[in-house]
Image: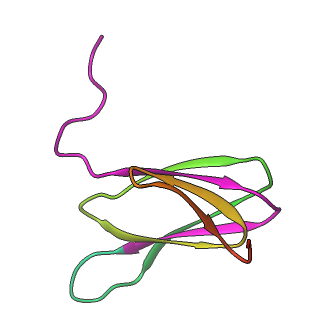
Amino acid sequence: MEKIFSESDGDYIAVKALEQGITVMGFTRGDETRSHHVEKIDKGDVLLLQFTQKTSAIKIKGNAEVYTKFGKILSGNLI
């Protein structure tokens, strides 16, 4: 089976929306950090994201489960 990505590709995360209208934003690298991509996902949706040469940060607004190589993180007002 052909490998889809290389060892030099960035880390991946998965975001699972726990409510309607979760906002996921990607931010650029470099001298001026700015938003370069915005996605809206709804309850039950899962979005897979990758840190790349262009993307250095990802911001999640709303209640969601975020899965990383470090484990699961809850975003939003979940206690």
User: Residue 42 falls in which quadrant of the image?
Assistant: bottom right
Q: Quadrant of the C terminus?
A: bottom right
Of the pair 11 and 34, the residue shown nearer to us: 11
Residue drawn at (27%, 23%) of the image: 3
Of the pair 56 and 34, the residue shown nearer to us: 56
Instruction: Specify the farthest residue to the left.
Output: 8
Instruction: Specify the farthest residue to the bottom.
Output: 32
| 18 in magenta | yes
| 48 in magenta | no
For the rendered model, the colour scheme is rainbow
Give the magenta range: 1-27
Q: Is residue 36 left or right of residue 62?
A: left
Q: Is residue 64 left or right of residue 12?
A: right
Of the pair 55 and 65, the residue shown nearer to us: 65
Q: Is residue 54 left or right of residue 35?
A: left
Instruction: Specify the farthest residue to the top.
Output: 1
Relative image position of residue 50 (x, y in whole percent): 39, 53
Residue drawn at (34%, 75%) of the image: 28
User: Residue 40 falls in which quadrant of the image?
Assistant: bottom right
Relative image position of residue 29 (x, y in whole percent): 27, 76
Q: Is residue 58 left or right of residue 32?
A: right
User: Residue 8 falls in which quadrant of the image?
Assistant: top left
Relative image position of residue 58 (x, y in whole percent): 46, 69
Figure check: 78 above or below 49:
below
Residue drawn at (23%, 61%) of the image: 53
Q: Quadrant of the N terminus?
A: top left
Figure check: 27 above or below 32:
above
Figure check: 15 above or below 25:
above
Relative image position of residue 65 (x, y in whole percent): 64, 57
